[in-house]
Image: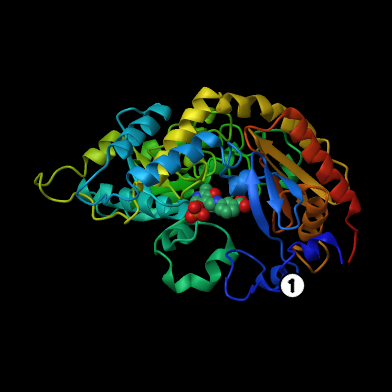
Amino acid sequence: MNAVTDLHPDSQNLDLRNWWMPFTHNRYFKAKPRLITKAKGAYYELADGRRVFDCLSGLWCSPLGHSHPTVVKAVQTQVETLDFSPSFQMGHPAAFALASRIAALAGRPNDSVFFVNSGSEAVDTALKIAVAYHRLRGDAARTRIIGRERGYHGVGLGGISVGGIVANRKMFAPLMVPGVDHLPHTWNPAQMAFSKGEPDWGAHLAEDLERIVALHDASTIAAVIVEPMQGSTGVIVPPKGYLKRLREICTKHGILLIFDEVITGFGRLGTPFAGSYFGVEADLNTFAKAVNNATVPLGGVIVREDIQQAFMSGPAHAIEFFHGYTYSGHPLAVAAAHATLDVMRDEKLIERAAALAPVLEKAVHSLQGEPHVTDVRNIGLASAIELAPYAGQPGLKAIKVFENALNDGQMPRFSGDILALAPPFISTETQVTDMVEGIRRALRATPATV
Ligand code: PXG
């Protein structure tokens, strides 16, 4: 029996049947369970006691590493002080302070922040705000939304409609939001394989938005939503000038631009948000994950001041936006966010992510030429390695490499035949280079055929 198949000492007694696991090969997993029992700093501890390096910062969400004492203390104190506070017609001070803090960090101190509990909710909230905004301004025909192929915007009905991953869409086609078009994705291996950072080729792909506008007329289009860097489908980095061009076309036609910053928000590119990295400002920005180091679910939407003001026209006693969640601005999530932002500021972690980015770039691109590797992509403290699939068995190669990596003390993310590496901001340079060496060994240990 190898180490992966026998990770839990009590696996005989643990009943794995009832938890239907999300985005997981449930049958494969339950035959070969991989159980995590603890986490501290940049490492997870598996049920057999082995420590593995957290190569994706959880699921892109734990840049401080795990159980940072400042965050732990903040949540402990909060649960004893105010464990829950209704946010419909009541409010608690820390949530207001957090909204101000996030707006300031985004360099948009007058903007509003709407709190939700996940990236999926943030996306659906942003789409609602965009469509309602146009209607409130008397532009009610602006209802179409433009997403992008290979986009991931969570699993809400809005998010899968604008998203561009066929497996997430095809089963649910009758439930999807009507009136959605998709821009082409920007990954073209013939033009950009093994590019470092932003590829030189591909800015012209933004012109496809003009084609969609010409097809439907700008007067029918509410918003364009894109991830500044496509995370889930394997760190697809925007070509130089692409996002700027999207911004120009949106502005020209009165279309709102939504950046889904669920992965890029709070430092992943070495800047607070991707907008500042690319020098392109969106009208609405979604966020989640790293905002509070994922200690308690939290997400949100940053809303440009005048967009929010468009909602403020009825009588003052009337609700302006019929939307919200029981847990919007949950005190524990908010406390974890304040603590996370304190740590990011005090330990200069966003600067550290920026400083580690070239270390990751150099290390991960040294995998060019290793077995199976057909592309390496990177930006900020994020990277992906594309593998040649086993003939007729898509996805299996990455599972094999992942299993070898886990046995080597590294826990990368695999999805399809892509591995993603986006280590915590607290990582040392050595941990980053060791991570890549572990992946190299895992690639070499993986057979060419099965
Ligand atoms: N938007 C973007 C850009 C995301 O990356 C979501 C929305 C949805 O967030 P929630 O909190 O509803 O899951 C995401 C989530 C991966 C991976 O391995 C990525 C995500 C989630 C889980 C795994 O790339 N992104």
Q: Residue 65: in sight, yes or no? A: yes
- Which residue of the protein is positioned furthest toward the front in this rendering? 80
**Quadrant housing the N terminus:** bottom right
Identify the colour scheme used. Answer: rainbow
Say what secondary structure mark 1 lies in: helix
Q: Position of residue 416 (x, y in %)?
A: 70, 59
Give the number of marks.
Answer: 1
* Residue at screen point 52% across, 29% down: 344
In the image, residue 337 above or below residue 272: below
Structural crowding at the residue carrying mark 1, measured as other residues with C-alpha within 10 Å and reported as few (<14), some (14–19) or many (≥20): few
Q: Position of residue 260 (x, y in %)?
A: 47, 45
* Residue at screen point 37% across, 30% down: 101
Corner quadrant of residue 393: bottom right
Residue placed under numbered mark 1 in the picture: 31
Left or right placement of residue 384 versus residue 348 in this view: right
**Quadrant housing the C terminus:** bottom right
In the image, residue 386 above or below residue 191: below
Q: Is mark 1 within 8 Å of ligand 1?
A: no
Left or right placement of residue 38 versus residue 320 in this view: right
Of residues 87 and 176, the one drawn nearer to the viewer in this rendering: 87
Of residues 315 and 288, the one drawn nearer to the viewer in this rendering: 288
Q: Residue 217: in sight, yes or no? A: no
* Residue at screen point 33% across, 43% down: 81
Left or right placement of residue 43 versus residue 405 in this view: left
The amino acid beneath tag 1 is Ala
Q: Position of residue 33 (x, y in %)?
A: 72, 66
